[in-house]
Amino acid sequence: MHDWDMDEYRAKQREAYEAIRAKHPALVTRGFSCFAGWFPILDSFFGEVEGALVEAPQARFDLWRVKEKFGRLRVYYVAPRSDATSDDSQVVREDNVRRRIDEAYERAEQEAKRTCDVCGEAGALRVRNGWFATRCEEHADGGVPYRPKGDAE
């Protein structure tokens, strides 16, 4: 266990998750498998999703999972087309909603690449004993900066 990963941190993490879930109850239907430093990014993402869904009331958003994988934020979701596919204008609106959701996810993913997943301060991808995490210096836990091949950042 890390110095920062104590009961107090976990309690604040649960509280922050519950606040996001209460703010976006129709969207946040699953728990998050990541630390609280990325929660503001996720809150913003779900806010953008809500804004996009207003454009096409028939459109749907199904959250499957939110997690950290290889030091990166991953949000798995589906925005399926409604049954009202005979109305061309509805199809166009739903396609636009899906595009806006995908763009919001891309922004969230890019922001998380630069954000410590523990505290939300500026961070970088780090590796320690084969484990990847995006962390600031304070929460690096011995991880050293790592730049994947072909990574432009």
Image (cartoon, rainbow, N blue to C red):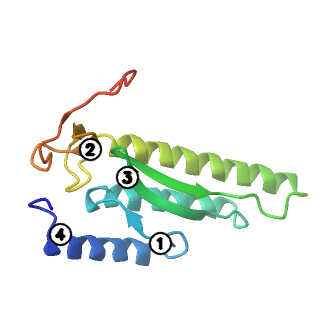
Residues at marks 3 and 4, CA–CA distance in whole angstroms: 17 Å
List the residue tagged with mark 4: 9
Dot 1 amino acid type: His
Mark 3 → mark 1, Cα distance in angstroms: 20 Å
Q: Element under label 4? A: helix
Amino acid type shown at disc 4: Tyr
* Res. 50 in view: no
Spatial CA span between label 1 and label 2: 26 Å
Return the residue at label 2: 134
Dots 1 and 2: beta carbons under 8 Å? no
Q: What residue type is labelled 2?
A: Thr
Q: Which residue is drawn at 22% across and 56% down?
A: 118
Spot occupied by residue 122 in the image (x, y as percentages of width and height): 20, 43
- Residue that label 1 marks: 24
Question: Residue placed at 51% from the left, 73% from the top?
Answer: 29
- In the rendered structure, find residue 68 and report the number of the disc placed on it: 3
Foreground label between 3 and 1: 3
Residues at marks 4 and 1, CA–CA distance in whole angstroms: 23 Å
Residue 129 placed where, x, y %? Answer: 22, 40
Helix, strand or loop under label 1: loop
SS of the residue under disc 2: strand
Q: How crowded is mark 4: few (under 14 residues within 10 Å), some or many (20 or more)?
A: some
Q: Which residue lies furthest to the front in this view?
A: 129
Where in the figure is residue 38, as x and y percent of width and height? 31, 56
State how far apart marks 4 and 2 are (Cα).
Answer: 18 Å
Of labels 3 and 1, earlier in sequence is 1
